[in-house]
Image: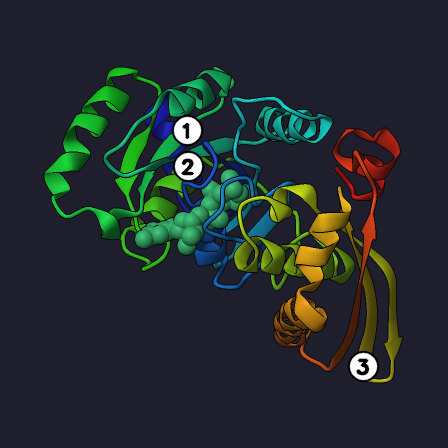
């Protein structure tokens, strides 16, 4: 069948597929996934390297199921086994998807972006989202970036968006649909993520650490859920935050435990909203020197 005939025959059919969201750290990949899904399924913060896992955000409508695969920002500096794992998560994620969306910062292409472009498998159709459009004072600044990216002859479309404000996101979704194969849904129509409450609970704690603490401590922490039980309507959750050194433990706790109290209370509020019921949350802090290079601990954190 000629290509046009195939396209026409498939036009009205249900489509479903995985779309990896990739890019350098901090360009807004997770914010975009949350915007696409309409819920906070993956954590975000102003700091680079917030995302450490692959997380699916699922959107189902009358004719399509989109499985958006959030990935860690691709690192160009390898300093630990954790960083190696995060990069491996990116390369593995893009190896088994139907399409990819490269997220760049609107108007600014860097060498780190170019490195990510080289990682995209040749046969995988891809789009570019020029994100943070709301920050651009002059939209003409989009043009040189569009020219550079379209000259690569690699992308089916280049779409300016603001993940934060929502502008352009519907246009991106329309382009993304065109890249998906005809097929039955992989997840239930009401699913928004493939991750369970235990994972989400740990991530909400980690998000608060990234948002509330300075430049050092977030990168020295990992979170494990020790206990997650239902008691009637209530979820009783015990989390342990691992840090690398004693002084980081002190910073995390804060004077009289005030920092930890604020952190746990913000994480608990998010969990209650997401899980739709009361949560009792206890957070402990433990020092484990060198955890980011310790295979056993990394496995325990799911990295
Ligand atoms: N102004 C503006 N800020 C945005 C937009 N999208 C994301 N941000 C901000 O950019 C920062 C990084 O967002 P994330 O979604 O965590 O970025 P990421 O690419 O997932 O980062 P990593 O997981 O660390 O690789 C956050 O402070 C977001 O609020 C946008 O469209 N406009
Ligand atoms: Mg992220």
Image quadrant in which the C terminus is located: top right
Residue at the (48%, 63%) spot, across then down:
38
Which residue is labeled 2 in the image?
A: 9
Tag nearer the camera, 2 or 3: 3
Q: CA distance from mark 2 to mark 3?
A: 51 Å
Tag nearer the camera, 1 or 2: 1
Quarter location, residue 238:
bottom right
Quarter location, residue 255:
bottom right
Q: CA distance from mark 3 to mark 1?
A: 43 Å
> Which callout, 2 or 3, points at the residue further toward the start of the chain?
2
Percent position (x, y) of residue 272?
Answer: 67, 76
In front of the other: 236 or 62 = 236
Relative side of 43 to 224, left or right:
left
Which residue is labeled 1 in the image?
A: 126
Percent position (x, y) of residue 200?
Answer: 69, 58
SS category of the residue bearing label 3: strand
Image label count: 3
Any atom of ligand 1 within 8 Å of the CB at mark 1? Answer: no
> Which callout, 1 or 2, points at the residue further toward the start of the chain?
2
SS category of the residue bearing label 2: helix
Quarter location, residue 227:
bottom right
Residue at the (65%, 60%) spot, across then down:
204
- Is residue 252 visible in the rendered image? The answer is yes
In front of the other: 270 or 146 = 270
Percent position (x, y) of residue 270?
Answer: 61, 71
SS category of the residue bearing label 1: strand
Residue at the (24%, 53%) spot, across then down:
134
Q: CA distance from mark 1 to mark 2?
A: 23 Å
Any atom of ligand 1 within 8 Å of the CB at mark 2? Answer: no
Q: Which mark is residue 234?
A: 3
Tag nearer the camera, 3 or 1: 3
């Amino acid at each position: 069948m000629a290509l046009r005939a195939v396209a026409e025959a498939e036009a009205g059919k249900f489509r479903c597929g995985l779309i990896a969201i990739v890019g350098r750290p901090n360009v807004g990949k997770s914010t975009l996934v949350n915007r696409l899904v309409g819920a906070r399924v993956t954590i975000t913060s102003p700091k680079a390297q917030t995302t450490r896992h692959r997380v699916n955000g699922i959107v189902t409508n009358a004719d399509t199921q989109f499985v958006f695969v959030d990935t860690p920002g691709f690192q160009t500096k390898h300093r630990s086994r954790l960083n190696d794992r995060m990069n491996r998560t990116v390369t593995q994620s893009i190896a088994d998807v139907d399409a990819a969306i490269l997220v760049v910062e609107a108007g600014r292409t860097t060498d780190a972006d170019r490195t990510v472009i080289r990682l995209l498998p040749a046969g995988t159709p891809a789009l570019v989202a020029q994100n943070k459009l709301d920050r651009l004072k002059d939209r003409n600044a989009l043009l040189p970036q569009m020219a550079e990216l379209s000259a690569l002859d690699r992308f089916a479309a280049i779409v300016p968006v603001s993940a934060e404000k929502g502008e352009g996101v519907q246009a991106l979704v329309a382009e993304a649909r065109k890249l998906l194969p005809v097929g039955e849904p992989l997840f239930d129509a009401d699913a928004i993520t493939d991750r369970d409450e235990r994972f989400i609970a740990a991530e909400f704690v980690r998000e608060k650490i990234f948002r509330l603490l300075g430049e050092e401590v977030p990168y020295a922490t990992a979170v494990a859920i020790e206990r997650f039980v239902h008691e009637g309507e209530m979820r009783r959750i015990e989390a342990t935050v691992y840090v690398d050194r004693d002084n980081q433990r002190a910073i995390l706790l804060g004077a009289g435990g005030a920092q930890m109290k604020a952190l746990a209370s913000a994480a608990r509020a998010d969990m209650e909203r997401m899980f739709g019921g009361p949560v009792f949350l206890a957070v402990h802090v433990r020092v484990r020197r060198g955890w980011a290079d310790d295979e056993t601990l990394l496995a325990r954190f799911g990295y």
